[in-house]
Amino acid sequence: MKNVTGNLQRDLEALKRILPAEDILTFSFASEEIDFACVFADPITDKELLGEQVVRPLLRYTGERKAEAVKKKLTSPEVKTERSLQTLAEEVLAGNPVLLWEGADEGIVAGTKKVFIRAIAEPSMDVAVKGPREGFIEDVKVNTSLVRRRLKTPELRIEMMKLGRRSDTFVAVCYLEGTSVKKTVEDVKKKLSAIDIDVIPDSSYLTHFLSSRPFSLLKQVGTTEKPDIFCAKIAEGRVGLIVDGSPIALTVPYLLVEDFQSAEDYFVPPYRATFTRLLRLFALIVAVYLPAFYVAAQLFKLQLFPVRLLLTIAGSIRDIPLSPSLEMLLVLLVLEVLNEASIRMPKYVGMALSVVGALVLGETAVSAGFVSTPAIIIIAFSGIGLYAVPNLIEQTSVLRLVMLLVAGSVGTYGIILVTAFLLLYLATAENFGAPVLAPFAPMLGRDLRDSLVKYNLGSLPMRPKTLKSPNRRRLK
């Protein structure tokens, strides 16, 4: 690896060979005694700061040529020296200009990169009526500042890592010293260090490498867009990851019960929080199983329907040309297509498409006799139920389709068999030493106080036993 030689022209040519792109510019200027040159990336360098904090202070410089002497004249708060030309080139690509001059065997890196960020706003998914409205954005420094503002303790550790051979994406590993399990922190760092990929544009790329079962249908890494939730999970003993360029932070270990909880649960009375958590679970179960049981009952077990309901359903499906399973599958696929189209299309066109698809297309299909009214009602209710737990939509929508196909082929026995396999899988799944189905499997009585049932804060003096934190007590 080549280092700075002290010959300005030779060093500039070496940097240009490493960085041949046309937007990498060189600005040369001279003081009364020394020739200087700044190498910077034009689109991502703040040229105004470069002139004020680097160039202007050196125009009348007459001191020594040593890097430490020159560095003292600069007014930039972020200044460091580097010898390696490769490291200097990486700093230029990060937006930090590099200062070289005749007779010096080191270069100076000044932190004057241009930052393009959007305003901090409420996230679209993690919406809360009560509680903080702030959400993460795409800048890692802003996101870590939101965390630091909430956890004003020297025990908070934020360790930066660079991942991606070409992207050099910053990943912040956040944890509380003495509260997070040391082995978990080391395992996370080890898995991150082992990643050998060219580009990491988003935090979702890391979930595959952090998962013990990468091809699992269900989640194994927690996600959140809210700093208050992120800090609360860290305070329980988890390890958090913030990726530059992504507004979605990751947390491990992950427990399935997390997605049935909401930040708002901690700003309302415990009985209300308990009710809403159980309501989310009920909505998810109905969303996944209702279409499957409807099809299985029609094909194999008509006795499952009450007599009056059976007569109503029989009247509505009398002239339907499709079998119950094909009919339900068709309606489900139409709903998925409408949902995908409304998301991808422009905002206002998507809203109109949803109305047209739900009302006009549904009413026309029923009137034409292609599908029955009960099928439309069941799929609509199932689609609404999935959004009661938005963090599990991708997994549960696939699971609903699997249940529907099994119900149309085998009936209720198939549904029960798939459910048994699913429970077995959840009961045996672990992530960073924590059972995914905890605190229900294994059963941990004290942890049940903040699971699907929410106790008041005074009844939660200890951190969750599932996370094995060395500092169990959080309330004295």
Image (spheres, helix red, strand yellow):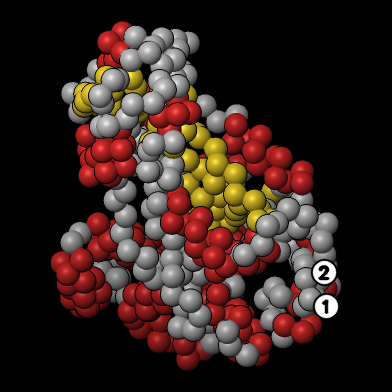
Kindly identify which residue carries mark 1.
476
- Tag count in the figure? 2
Residue in the image at 50% along x and 35% along y: 162
Residue 113 at x, y percent in the picture: 32, 41
- Tell me if mark 2 has few (under 14), some (14-19) or many (20+) residues whose alpha carbon lies within 10 angstroms of its own: some
Regarding residue 242, the answer to whether it shows in the image is yes
Residue in the image at 45% along x and 29% along y: 69
Residue in the image at 38% along x and 38% along y: 74
Kindly identify which residue carries mark 2.
473
The quarter in which the C terminus is drawn is bottom right
Asked whether, in this view, residue 400 is left or right of residue 116, the answer is right
Asked whether, in this view, residue 199 is left or right of residue 152, the answer is left
Q: Are marks 2 and 1 in contact (CB under 8 Å)?
A: yes
Residue sitting nearer the eye, 331 or 57: 57
Residue type marked 2: Arg
Residue 205 shows which numbered tag? none
Residue 255 at x, y percent in the picture: 66, 60
Residue in the image at 41% along x and 81% along y: 313
Regarding residue 382, the answer to whether it shows in the image is no
The image shows residue 387, relative to residue 217, as above or below, that is: below
Residue sitting nearer the eye, 98 or 130: 98
Residue sitting nearer the eye, 12 or 376: 12
Residue 7 at x, y percent in the picture: 34, 9
What is the CA distance from the residue labelled 2 to the residue labelled 1?
A: 7 Å
Residue 340 at x, y percent in the picture: 29, 58
Asked whether, in this view, residue 394 is left or right of residue 332, the answer is right
- Tell me if mark 1 has few (under 14), some (14-19) or many (20+) residues whose alpha carbon lies within 10 angstroms of its own: few
The image shows residue 244, relative to residue 121, as above or below, that is: above
